[in-house]
Image (cartoon, helix red, strand yellow):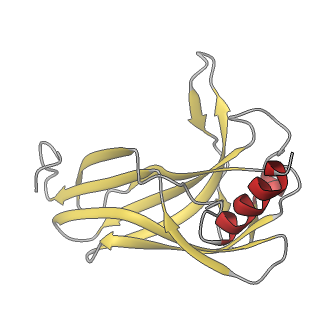
Amino acid sequence: MRRAPAALAVAAVLAGCGLQDPYPLPAEPPGDATFHAVAVGEPVTEAVLFIEARTGTRLEIVAAEAIGTLGGATVEFSASTLTEDDQGEVVIGDDQADVAGLRIDELVDPRADPPANTVAIVAEITPSEPGRYVLSTVQLTYRINGAPERHGEGMDVVVTVCADDPAPSDCDDEP
């Protein structure tokens, strides 16, 4: 019977030593990658981070910054809800919201089942000159339950854009 309090004490110490919940960023590195061959000036829109709302947690996104090989391309972020289409596939909703000042719990219902409780952070990458552009992570500045701002990096999908004029025939994982 004395082991239970000792186990709780060990668990509390381990939690304080860095085994903390990474929310709202993914705990794992990106699990997917996309490749887009486009003409210079043609935007690519891709969901890069999925944030599931949690009951009792007020998450506010203060800012999002693109990190990667992006000189020669602009990246703009927006947020959208996830929905299911007629075939049951999960898709990005039509409405886009500004990321700065976004409250996740106001955009979706945390008590709903996925995907209805999930917000996608969407990146729009527009190359202004020929090149290969890779959005490899997103740096989020956010607040949880009104606490001071936090900064973290992570994303679920790495996006590679190959741009030329005219558009290249393909864009794969080889530089």
Residue 170, position in %: x, y? Answer: 14, 43
- Is residue 167 or residue 118 the one in the foreground? 118
Residue 21, position in %: x, y? Answer: 65, 60
Residue 51, position in %: x, y? Answer: 64, 52
Q: Quadrant of the N terminus?
A: top right
Res 111 quadrant in image: top right
Question: Residue 118 vs residue 87: left or right?
Answer: right
Question: Residue 14 vs residue 76: left or right?
Answer: right
Residue at (89% x, 55% y) in the render: 56
Residue at (67% x, 33% y) in the render: 83
Q: Residue furthest top?
A: 87
- Is residue 26 or residue 7 the one in the foreground? 7
Residue 22, position in %: x, y? Answer: 61, 62
Q: Is residue 103 above or below residue 64?
A: above
Question: Residue 11 vs residue 163: left or right?
Answer: right
Q: Residue furthest bottom?
A: 148
Q: Quadrant of the C terminus?
A: bottom left
